[in-house]
Amino acid sequence: MTTLAPSPSRVRAITSRNISALRSGPEYWVTVLSGVFEPLMYMLAMGVGLGSLMTSGHWTVDGKEVSYLQYIAPAMLASAAMSGAVSETLIHFFFKLRYQHTFEGMLATPIRPVDIVAGELLWALIRSAAYIAVFLAVIATLGVTTPARALVVFPAGFLVSFAFGALGMVVATRLRGPQDFDAVVVGQLALFLFSGAFAPLSRYPEPLHTLAALLPLYHGVELVRGTAFGHLSLALAGHAAYLLALGVGCLTWTARRIELGDD
Amino acid sequence: MTTSSLAVMERHLIAYRRLWKSSALSAVLTPVLFMVSIGVGVGGFVDEVDGVPYLAWIAAPLLLSAVFQQTAQESTSRVFHELNTTRTVHAIVATSAGVRDVLVGRLLYLMIRVQFSTVCFLAIAACFGAVRSWWILAEPLVAAAVAIATALPLTALASTITDDTYLPAVSRLITVPVVLFSGILFPPTKLPEWAAAAVYASPLWHGVDLARAAALGQRPDWPLWAHIAVLGVWSAAGYALSSRILHRRVYDGNS
């Protein structure tokens, strides 16, 4: 079973290839930077725009009253962590695999599939970490979190990226082609809209409420919101365990699948 | 509309047979997900807007946002690939069809998709009590006008792009902000003046105002002629620009 362990130097080679792709011109930079723009736009439109239609006093975290903008801001961090990771490991990974044939050249060298999986995931995590850092600055400015608590929020966001990065790879290996892209986009939108980012899940009627509580981004949002507001509880450990198990499970599954070569 | 335009439309419909299930489902599901997530989840905390419950206030506009997104996707990524990857556009103009047929044929094909999702979504929105007037029958017209005023300018833009890495950025920097700020979830009057002015320039806002007025049986914020004028200007300018750019790309050999 030694074949399942990635080699650190080869993983580093895969990750550096992605980093050097940034030097090829402005295109990739525009893509990476625009990824953080989208959740920021959501935060402004919902938090400021929609928030202006509400009377105050509805939104509380841990019994403390907060503004709607403060309520959704940490959730947007979780969402940015998710989309940063997923846009690399799902769609971009699929294009490299199927259309750009990026991995074929690599596999002609001593690099093995498992190194590629680990290297691409590592790059996805680096990209998400940059998004998380931007949002940490945003939520600190909004008074949601303090620099000390940010030290806990960062790994919480990182865990969200890890879980979704690994989940994205599982989906990428299952995609048949462009006919599945719509389903991927709607799936990601559903995770986002029913993550409890915009309203507590208890606002939804019953079958929907329970279903939404099983979705992974809900656990990400709860974890990030809880740590950001410094509301530490045992439930947070549960959310973290859920995300960790999801990430490890998906990663193992992908590595096995690639090792078996059943493509 | 010529036989060649219809042939182009038919070509797109044939290619769509492989994609239509997930595509049609996502076109209907996207506004429904927003309606339930925001309308039901957040709507209870929002006071009535213009004397209407929040869910009903956003339902018809959400349809327009889905129409806009569907059209934007079709007019950016798809146009890009047909010009650069599959070069379908070059193949089409190698026949008796011209650039005009490329544009009109694609619009006709889009109309079929847009009208399908409009009817499906309105049926669902009616179940949520969000359809309150017979003026709703005008909704397909509004959806068509927004689709045309969106498709043509974006086709012009996509025809100038030669690197597909820019495509996600077009979606995140243009489509998403337009959807979020075009008066669907909150009125543009809540924005600072400069931002509101930008919103009034977007074709989506004009469709949103008309769609909301039709669904609720209210008077639109702007007079009808003003909406028609703005949508008309976007469509005409988009047509002029996209046909010129496409012409250059496919006939001048510098593609």
Image: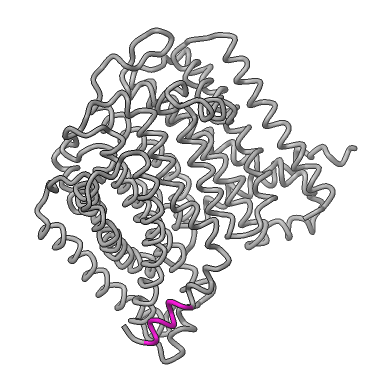
Q: Residue at x 42, y 80 (%)?
A: B254
Q: Quadrant of residue A233?
A: top right
On the rendered structure, is A38 left or right of A222? Answer: left
The one nearer the camera, A249 or A198, is: A198
**From this viewpoint, which residue is outermost toward the bottom?**
B96
Q: Is residue B6 magenta?
A: yes
Q: Residue at x 89, y 38 (%)?
A: A2
Q: Position of residue A103 (x, y in %)?
A: 71, 56
The one nearer the camera, B123 or B65, is: B123
Question: Height in image: A12 above or below B123?
Answer: above
Question: Height in image: B247 above or below A142?
Answer: below
On the rendered structure, is A60 left or right of B139? Answer: right
The residue segment tinted magenta is B3-10
Question: Height in image: A177 above or below B98?
Answer: above
Q: Position of residue A169 (x, y in %)?
A: 66, 44
**From this viewpoint, which residue is outermost toward the right?**
A1
Q: Position of residue A91 (x, y in %)?
A: 58, 51
The quarter in which the N terminus of chain B is drawn is: bottom left
Q: Residue at x 32, y 39 (%)?
A: B129
Q: Position of residue A250 (x, y in %)?
A: 71, 36
Q: Main secondary structure of the magenta part?
A: helix
The quarter in which the C terminus of chain B is drawn is: bottom left
